[in-house]
Image (cartoon, coloured by chain):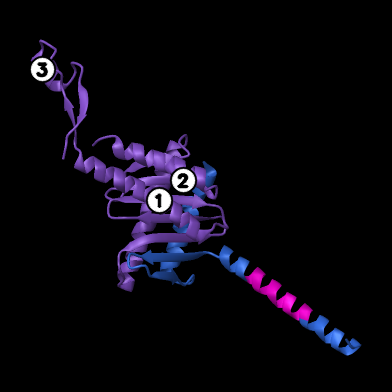
Chain colours: A blue, B purple
Amino acid sequence: MSRRRKSVAVALLLTTASAGAAWMIKRRQDGRRPHVGLYFEDGSMVSLPDTSPQATQLVELGREAVAIVRGA
Amino acid sequence: MSEIVPSAASSALDELLEVSPQVDAAVILRRAGGGLLASAPPTRDRMSDQFGATCVRILEAAEQSRVELGREPIAQVEVATPEGHVFIVADADHVVAAVTDADPTVGLVFYDLKTALRAVREAAAQSDNGLVVAVAEDDSDDPDAAIAGRAGAKWRRKKS
């Protein structure tokens, strides 16, 4: 393999690895962001936008519930 | 009401905490009125009452959102916060709620909560089908005592 091809392969590998790592970090951060999922009897699910007043209220209650359990 | 349902609820929560290490605490409530049926870990009664009351409020808020969205009845709720997640699974009669760490396996926790809810539902159905009646043994001279079941009362399951 020529030197030039080797460099391209290494660059591609580094780019792919960086993109993968960034995707994984973002996914993990998203998972840690407050969110609300409502699951209905018909099997469907709605994720409330975290800016909606309903989600804000539910997240606040969720924090309260977690604090009660952690504080006990 | 017989002790079958609270006992089954308590066993279901013991099992839940055993199989699901992500769950820090859990309660089982009656849907109507939010009365506490069982909680785990068992030594934190005050926490259980407060946690149960907050879960009822979460379910009410979720129900309000459901009405606004014009959707089917709610079966499950997940509220994720950076400090931990609150999971609620409900049917028409009972509610099972749990708090987990901040990075739970969502599907697995819901599965375990639904298993606990099913155990309580089956115990409630069993309790409804086989009404437990107190039968006073007729070995006392005191008719009032016999009626009250104080004279060696036995518990017998009525055949449905």
Pointers 2 and 1 in contact (C-beta within 8 Å): yes
**Mark 2 or mark 3: which comes first in sequence?**
2
- The reply, left or right, for residue B134 in relation to residue A58 is left
The residue at which mark 3 appears reads as B144
Q: Residues within 10 Å of mark 2 (few under 14, many from 20)?
A: many
Report if residue A24 lies within the magenta region. Answer: yes
Q: Nearer the viewer, mark 1 or mark 3?
A: 1
Between residue A10 and residue B73, name the one nearer to us.
Answer: A10
Q: Is residue B34 visible?
A: no
**Residue span colored magenta:** A13-26
Helix, strand or loop for the magenta stretch, by majority: helix
**Mark 2 or mark 1: which comes first in sequence?**
2
The residue at which mark 2 appears reads as B16
Q: Provide the secondary structure element on which disc 2 rests.
A: helix
Instruction: Give the residue displayed 43% in from the left and 38% down from the top.
Output: B46
Q: Which mark is residue B53?
A: none
Instruction: Give the residue displayed 88% in from the left and 86% down from the top.
Output: A1
Which image quadrant: the C terminus of chain B?
top left
The residue at which mark 1 appears reads as B115
